[in-house]
Image (tube, grey):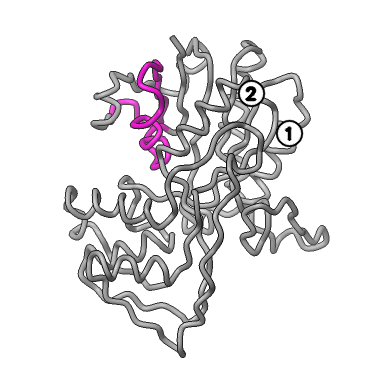
Amino acid sequence: MTTAAILGAHGQIARGLVEHLPHEWDLRLFSRRPDAGYPEAATRDAPMRPYDAFASAGVDLVINAAGPGDPGTHRTIGAEIFRVTETFDNLALDYLAAHPDTAYFNLSTGALCDADGDRRGSRLTLDLDDLARANPYVLAKLNAEAKHRNLPDFRIADLRVFGYFSRHIDLRAQFFAAQAVAHLCAGHEFHTHPADFVRDYVSPDDLAGLIATLYESGTPNRAVNALSAQPVTKFGILDALHDRYGLRFSVDGGEPDRLEEAQGVPAGDGAGIGFCPKLTSAQIVLRETEALYHTRERAPEVTIDGND
């Protein structure tokens, strides 16, 4: 039986993985709040443990989903994101040093690929004389990936997540889709600017499938883009939420500058790993909103604190 540890077990991505990783896998969850469980973990009979028990976890693979994912939190903690990222990455690397056959999956960011959101890009431009203006979260993830590529004897896969949306999202987070759905749940009109943009939301099940595929292939030491079958534009999301659930939205400052429909990814993401995402970004947002909107009383929790 394959045994997997998940760091950051209470986060949105971790909860989706607990639901969708292969059910024959034995999961061991690690969190700062080991006494606070949730239904998905109980269904999998996955014990929650403190981080000081991780060194003796006895697992075949480690998934590092720890650390803040909300852009609002990134701005609040600033340079502290370097310390947080290093802490959990070093926790995993120390485990690999003691157990070199263990596979390690690190949740990285698609923002490393291209500032304009090119899902197949592989370049990041930095002004080395003005790093204070660079995004600390991106630099922290870049540092982790550079460290991993310089450990070629270890089985480390960095999964670059461009976007992620699930029923476990915190509707107070400063993500575009979270803000839109928060307004929907609270019954408020969503205000946005005319400029369009593209988002790519990998689904919880596709991300879990990617991890399983990479693990079965030996977990080569490399970075892999974690993508949906097709990205979606901002106005594509708003239109879909309006048509399905009646979201009211308005565009302030002019007519919408709508982009053309974004293209899907090549079969297998062109990465040669034998995995192709099944769901488009639009399908993911609608499916997860369906679960969130109808099965959870979220509106009372939502404080509308500005729009996109």
Residue furthest right in the image: 129
Image quarter in which the C terminus is found: bottom left
The residue under the point 49% across, 36% down is 66
Q: Dot 1: within a 10 Å radius of its alpha carbon, few (fewer than 14), some, or many (20 or more) residues?
A: few
**Residue marked by disc 2:** 93
On the image, numbered disc 1 is attached to which residue? 147
**Which residue occupies the foreground of this view, 81 or 1?**
1
Above/below status of 162 relative to 34: below
In what element is the residue under mark 1?
helix
Q: Is residue 148 above or below residue 154?
A: below
The picture places residue 286, in percent across and down from the top left corner, at 32, 56
Q: Which residues are magenta?
A: 9-36
Q: Earlier in the sequence, mark 1 or mark 2?
A: 2
Q: Is residue 207 left or right of residue 307?
A: right
Screen quadrant of the N terminus: top left
Q: Amino acid at mark 1?
A: Lys
Amino acid residing under circle 2: Leu
